[in-house]
Structures are given as structure tokens and as C-alpha cells.
Image (cartoon, coloured by chain):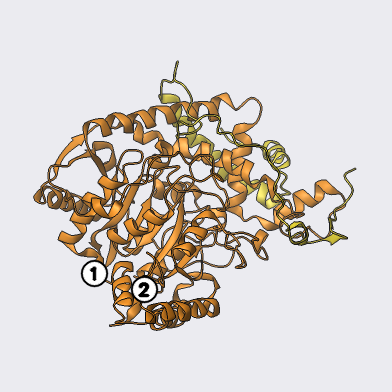
Chain colours: A orange, B yellow
Amino acid sequence: MNLNLLTIKQAQEKLQKKEISCQELTQSCIIQIENTEEHLHAFLAKNFDQALEQAKKVDRKIKQGEKLKPLEGIPCSIKDIICTKGIRTTAASKMLQNYEPLYDATVIKKIKDAGAIILGKNNCDAWAHGSSTENSDFGPTHNPWDITRVPGGSSGGGGASVAADQVIFALGTDTGGSIRLPASFCGIVGLKPTYGRVSRYGAIAMGSSLDTIGPMTKTVEDAAIVLQIIAGTDKKDSTTPAVKVPDYSQALQKGIKGLKIGIPKQALGQGLDSQVKTLFEVSVKELEKLGAKTKEIEMPYLDYGLAVYYIIMPAEVSSNLGRYEGIRYGRPAKNAADLMEIYTKSRAQGFNPENKRRIMIGTYTLSAGYYDAYYKKAMQVRTLIKKEFENALNKVDLILMPTAPSPAFKLGEKTDDPMQMYLADIYTINLNLAGVPGISMPCGFANGLPVGMQLIGPQFGEEKIFQAANAYEQATGWHKIKPKI
Amino acid sequence: MKLTKAEVEKIAKLSRLELTEEEKDQYAGQLSDVLAYFEKLKEVNTENVEITSQVTGLENVYRNDKINQCDCQKELVKQAAETEEDLIKTRSVF
């Protein structure tokens, strides 16, 4: 067996039992990256030398019979929007193409403390603006199931890396679906935790009231293992409440029997691909067979989520990207006459069209005379959406929806029509507005392309999600089907 | 509602973005489409509905305003493209 195919759990056990060495494991991931990168372009920076050095140290520890830490010796990759000390971090933007952070993000510090080995940085849409990874300033990532298709976005590099077994797991960010959409398109597991469950310190900010960091993994169990490490309050991120981090591994064993799962009628309407709908309906039956009780629920405000999101997110984007002016970050434009021209010209050169659209939409909706009509209105409807989730999750344990309206689309198919691209997020964005957690996991294939579904829990209710998702995964085994690349 | 070229120019100025003539035309159309989609929210009655600007329920998270030395001033300044004697260089303000 190629070691790069292992899950975190399997690799951990084999390392500890001395069945495999960490150098073999790391090397097999590196070989897979070298064999497949030409087709996938999932990486923007590689860290192989340091990774192999670290693997050697882990092997020494194993030889001496020391107990390994939870992620010790496990090769992973990191979305290039999360700061890694000494490893170039570009946010996939030309603006930051030479930026080397002087510090690690909190999640990086945590996975390093737990022993993880970072193989490199994953491609994404520049500043995480996109649903396909085509907005990367360094070229798109391709879907391992069909390289003429997108991997989803914005964490598309991570999705492709995990699906193609280039790494054992990846970390992504999710502001409106950027972990779950690539998870769905690439046939892997992606968890968007509760807003505030994982510190965002060191993640380059996009929409600060929406941004989350989470695991992209091969199994539900692995997602629980990674969340266990990265979750928790952090003094450096004041939006992380001091809610106790439960033992997620316990939740995995609890099973699904008796759990009530609500299916919003509004999630199965217009715009949903017929094959995705059929697979979703089969999955509902499977969940019932496993002992869950499902029922249709009404969530009428879901339909307004996309409009709310595309007001609030660009507003926050326009503020967060204000600091990139070509002086402290990036390069000042050569032909600028004065300070104002440094700003306008450097930003014109450093940002791509999608970045510019979002900055301008946000600037417009926040500007005098339009604030009430757009931004305030959106924040009010956000309240209604949040309450709708709370009410629904008082009556049921979990909510089930498709992750995306279709399987992976073709490269170039939606790049000329921003509104069409935004519609790919229609099922994912509401969770970010409400702050609730959700997992996307494989639920079948449509014409050879993976399709995902998402299980949604209440704020800080990741345990119930793991409980149901693990039972479904074990019963169906979709995660065992791999792309031929 | 379609944004005029003058409106796009004003938004671009506030956004500190220099746009080409071609971009102005392109964005006028694309931004208008997106703004038209926002009209959907008019269907929702939001009278007396509070706003949600954050979802954690946390308020006023304080810390002591204590200064710590990071010993990285030089490296931080060096991250700027143009520097001189540990200072970041830029064009004149006026």
C-alpha cells in the first residue's frame, strides 16, 4: 500500500507500532506531489527539506519508544492564506508574492506543537475570493477527478491535495463555503467549525464576522482529530469564547440512532441539479435506515442568505483589504507621482478583477446614503437567518442540506459571470451568517464526479455532527473511492 | 438600476483603485447586476429587527494594555519594499 493513502488515524497507529517510518510516510507524500502537481497545481510553496528533517527526528523518537503526540509525523498542507513563519504566504495574490511572515498563526502553532509536518502551502482564490480557485493570481488548481474541472474554492488546493492523497490532511478557511465547496467537489470531508471555535489569529482576514479555519480530511474521524487540536479560546483572537472543548473522539462512537434531522424544503428547490437531488434523497433514506428520524422543515429566510452575504462580506473585505497599499505590503507602483497615486496604482496592479469587484461593492454599500438600504438591511436579515437556524435546531438535532447545487463545473465555465459563480455558494453561506458549524462529506457520484452533503449543528455543536457523519460514512464507504490521477 | 460611469469612478476613488476605461465599462455592468440581486431583500420586512454584526455573543473583550518587546522591529520594517535606515520610505503626502 502507498503510505500517502493513509488517514491520520491509520498513520498514527502504524508509526507508533513501528510498522512504518515517518520518513517513508513523508517521502511517499512528496513523491505523490511530484507525480501529480503538473496536472493539479495544488501547491504555491513547498517545504520538503524541512519536512524531511522533521521526519528524521520523529523516527528517532519512535525508535526510542517515546509516545507520539496526536499529529506527530503526519504530513499536511496549509491554505496559503494562513501565516506560516519563514514560509512564503501569498494569499494567492500578486500583492503578497514576496511576503514571508515573521510569526505563525495560532492554528499553525497548535498543529506544530502536536507534531504535524507541513509539506507546503496550498493554492486558493486570491484573498479567498472565489468558488473555484480560478481567481488565484498564480493559475488555477485542477480537480483530481477530472482535470478539466475546478476543485471548488476558495480552498481548492487543499481539496485537491487531500483527494489526490498528496497529503494526509489540509487546513482551509471558510467564509462562505470555502472549505465545504471544495470538499464536495473533490469528494473529501471538510468541516467549517462554529464561528469562534478556532482562533483566526494569523489568517489573512477576508470577512471578519464570517471567517473560520477548519480541517479538510479523508474521513470524519480525522476531521475530529484535527479539530481537537486547533479548537479553543485564544487571547490573540477576541472572538473565541471560552467554551470548553469536548473530547470529540467520544462523539464518534455514539452513533446516529434517535437523532432528529431536519431537511429544509427551501434547500431542494429551483437550481438544484437533478442527479445531486436524487443522491441527496437516497442519503436521507440511508440516514433513516441507520436509525435517524428525518423530517421536512421550513426555513424561508434561507433564500435571502446569498444577497445578505454578498453585502456583508464585501463590506468587510473592503475594510480588511484597505491596508494593502503597496508600501508596507507589496511593491509601490513605479510611476506614482504622490502618495495617493501609490495607493491607487499599487492596488490596481496588486488586486485582480474579483478582488476589485468586492472592494468596490463593499465601498459602495458602506458609503454615505446607501448604508441603511444595503448594509443595515443585510445585518437585519442576518438576524432573521440566525434566529431561523436557532429555532430549527431547537426542534431537531441537525439540519441536512446539499453542499452545492451541482458537481464540479468546468474551468472557465463561470469566470465571465460573477453572479453565476456566487450562486455556487447558495447552500453554504447561510451557516457563516448564522455562525453555526457544518461538515461536507461525500454522498455519492454523478457521472463519475463526487457529490457532497452537509450536516449542520447548533453553535458549538460539532459533537452531534461528528456522531451522525461518522455513522453515515462507516455505513456507506463513499470515502474509500479514490480518483485515478 | 445601472451604475453610470461617473458613479463607478466615484466608487473607484473611494476604493483607492485606478481603473482603465475598459474596466469602468465592465464593472458598471457587473456591479449593477450584483446590486440588482440585492433588491431581493426588499421583500423582507425588517421593521424593529435588531442588527447582527457578530455572532459570538461576546461583548467588550478587554486585555491589559501592556507593552511587550518583540525584538523584531528591524525585520518588520525590512518587509516593506522601500526602506532607509530602519524607516519605511514613501512618496510625499502632498
Q: Which mark is residue A480?
A: 1
Same-subunit check for callouts 2 and 1: yes
Identified by mark 2, the residue type is Asp
Quarter occupied by the C terminus of chain A: bottom left
Identified by mark 1, the residue type is Lys
Task: In the rendered view, tell whether residue B3 sits above or below residue A226.
Answer: above
Residue A143 seen by the camera: no
Give the x, y percent position of residue A267.
28, 41
Q: Chain of mark 2?
A: A
Give the x, y percent position of residue A348.
70, 53
Horizontal side of residue A99 vs A270, given as left or right: right
- In the foreground, A36 or A108: A108
Task: In the rendered view, tell whether residue A159 sits above or below residue B18.
Answer: below
Residue A466 seen by the camera: yes
Q: Which residue is mark 2?
A: A165
Task: In the rendered view, tell whether residue A361 sits above or below residue A424.
Answer: above
Q: Residue at x 41, y 25 (%)?
A: B43
Q: Residue at x 54, y 58 (%)?
A: A82
The residue positioned farthest toward the top in the image shown = B48
**Local secondary structure at mark 2:** loop
Give the x, y percent position of residue A110.
48, 58
Q: Which mark is residue B88?
A: none
- In the foreground, A73 or A440: A73
Alpha carbons under labels 2 and 1: distance apart: 12 Å
N-terminal label among 2 and 1: 2
